[in-house]
Image: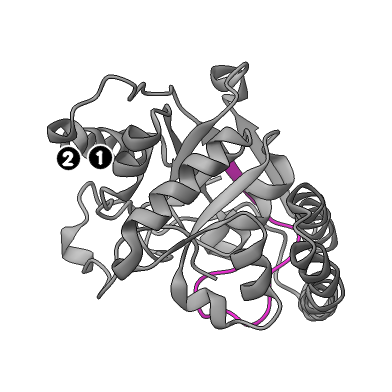
Amino acid sequence: MDCGSTREGPPAPTGQATGARPVLRSACGPAGLLSRLWGALATALCVLYTALLGVVACGLAALGLQREVAAVSRLWARLIILTCGVKVEVEGLEKIAGLKSLVLVANHQSAFDIFALLARMPGTLSFVAKKELVRIPLVGYALKHGGHIIIDRQQGGRAIRKGIEAARRGSWICVFAEGRRYTDGRVHEFSDGAAWLASAARLPCVPVAISGSGAFFPRGALVVRPGCRMRIRVLDPVETAHMAKEERAALTRRLEEAVRGALVAEL
């Protein structure tokens, strides 16, 4: 599932990425028969969690109980992480201690980025998601009505308003700035949507580098490779309260370079 980015249209080609690195690897056990069986069973259980908790989340969302939706989402993510035996290492949370609302700006390797952020970030997350995700049964309804921000090119102003509303609720807004998942070991070009949203809402931007998840559940995978490790590294926040709109492009490049510099090639 690809969440977050105001970029619509074709993804950036690989040639637009700079700072090439080897394909990311994650510390995993040997891929033997037991590991494959564990992966198949874990994947089936994760589908079951999604179906059962998705119904609960949709019911709560229909009642306007967004805090409760967030709690169910966190439980869902933690169950998936636990069942798949994924160890999530988090660095740098002290950099954002005391911030009530902010915009997390991350690279995107795997659906497990979403699970790990939901499970391990201390704040309540509101994801910026492409409108195509609304079509997914259960998940789409919970996204649309659970306090998340759906991007529609024809309604850009509405996305900003929802972002400001989320900030006022104390949510942490999460943007996957590349616009899709990449597992080639590079950080690809960031869209300027995060800088645009953060400056409009007067929120600090926090670059976040996610490493390792693409090695055990890359884009297009059907079965997870269990027992692996990934890392979330939270970097220094960048204030936007007094930022002019002409500075958004420079901020976007600054965030992109910060994430690129913090990416770990091998765990």
Q: Residues within 10 Å of mark 1 (few under 14, many from 20)?
A: many
Query: Does the image show residue 171?
Result: yes
State whether residue 107 is above or below residue 261. Answer: below
Q: Residue 162 in the image: x percent, y percent?
A: 49, 50
For the residue pair 191 and 209, the one nearer the viewer reads as 191
Secondary structure found at label 1: helix
Give the magenta-colored segment's residue range: 217-231
Task: Identify which residue is drawn at 33% across, 36% down.
Answer: 200
Task: Identify which residue is drawn at 87% across, 75% down.
Answer: 52
When asked about the image quadrant of residue 23, the answer is: bottom left
Query: Does the image show residue 265?
Result: no
State whether residue 237 is above or below residue 185. Answer: above
Q: Residue 108 in the image: x percent, y percent?
A: 45, 56
**Image quadrant in which the C terminus is located:** top right
For the residue pair 42 and 117, the one nearer the viewer reads as 117
When asked about the image quadrant of residue 217, the answer is: bottom right
Residue 247 appears left or right of 175: left
Q: Which residue is mark 2?
A: 249
Distance in Å between CA atoms under marks 1 and 2: 5 Å
Type of amino acid under label 1: Thr
Q: Which mark is residue 65?
A: none
Task: Identify which residue is drawn at 55% across, 30% down.
Answer: 101
Q: Residue 184 in the image: x percent, y percent?
A: 37, 63
Scheme of colours in the image: one colour
Secondary structure found at label 2: helix
Q: Which mark is residue 252?
A: 1
Residue 143 appears left or right of 73: left
